[in-house]
Image (spheres, rainbow, N blue to C red):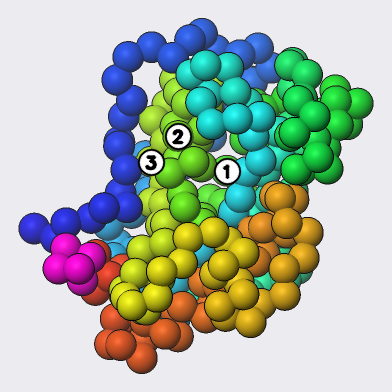
Amino acid sequence: MTFDPFFFMKGIQGKLGGSQSGQSQQQVAFLRQLQREMRVEETLNIPLTDLNVIVFDIETTGFYPEQGDQIISIGAIKVKGNKINENETFYSLVRSDKLLTDEISQLTGLYDTQLQQAPPLSEVLFQFFQFAQDYTLVAHHANHEKIFLQHASWKLYRAPFKHRLVDMSFLYRIAEPDVKLITLEECCEHNGIPIIGRHHALEDAKLTAQLWSIYVNKLNQRGCESLKDLYERLTKA
């Protein structure tokens, strides 16, 4: 059996709180139907040069959703193989019921007045999943995104988060095992990508999409042509 470190939990144990008001039965039905129709295993053998992915980023008020930290923006862009679809993007602020700290406002450029007028998470997450459909998701150091999407999906819809989520850091490890890259800035500088709009969810997603495009090519040069190849090499790394 192939070890798959990116196919995260199919369910979340325990209760994470009651459903947030605002989501409709239609939204819940759509998301559950989408999850039933997902064929995440089929993506394993698709060549990376043909794989459809959604590269995305979230900005949050902190690191711990179970302690009340919230998503405040989501940005995403579609990529096929190493081709970035500049015209197919998603971005939305998310309403927050807690005041932002000065540190978060300075980091993200977002302020309470903007978030108070934004749509609720139930609506934004539904729109994001409509945009993403059953595409493979990609994020830089994806554990942060995984934790928040798992928490929100279960809290809002009583449904597990079932998308395949690929962490860019694993691509770095296999493509350039002798190079230690951690932050998004370091990865961009190493690959000659100008850093624009840092800590804006859509701009960070675009930076990560450029990295995905580059590392799909680097992996191919190493004979790593699919997610299955990537997973198998990770078990030996």
Q: CA distance from mark 2 to mark 1?
A: 16 Å
Q: CA distance from mark 1 to mark 3?
A: 11 Å
The residue closer to the viewer here, 191 or 76, is 191
Amino acid bearing label 1: Phe
Q: Given this view, does label 2 or label 1 mark the residue nearer the observer?
A: 2
Q: Which residues are magenta?
A: 233-237
Residue picked out by circle 2: 147
Specify few, some or many for label 1: CA neighbours under 10 Å numbering under 14, 14-19, or 20 or more. Answer: some
Relative to 163, say whether 173 is above or below. Answer: below
Specify few, some or many for label 3: CA neighbours under 10 Å numbering under 14, 14-19, or 20 or more. Answer: many
Mark closer to the chain start, 1 or 3: 1
Q: CA distance from mark 3 to mark 2?
A: 12 Å
- Name the side, left or right, on which 156 lies relative to 181: right
- Name the side, left or right, on which 203 lies relative to 5: right
Mark closer to the chain start, 2 or 1: 1
Residue sticking out furthest to the right: 113
Q: Does 83 appear in magenta? A: no
The residue closer to the viewer here, 206 or 103, is 103
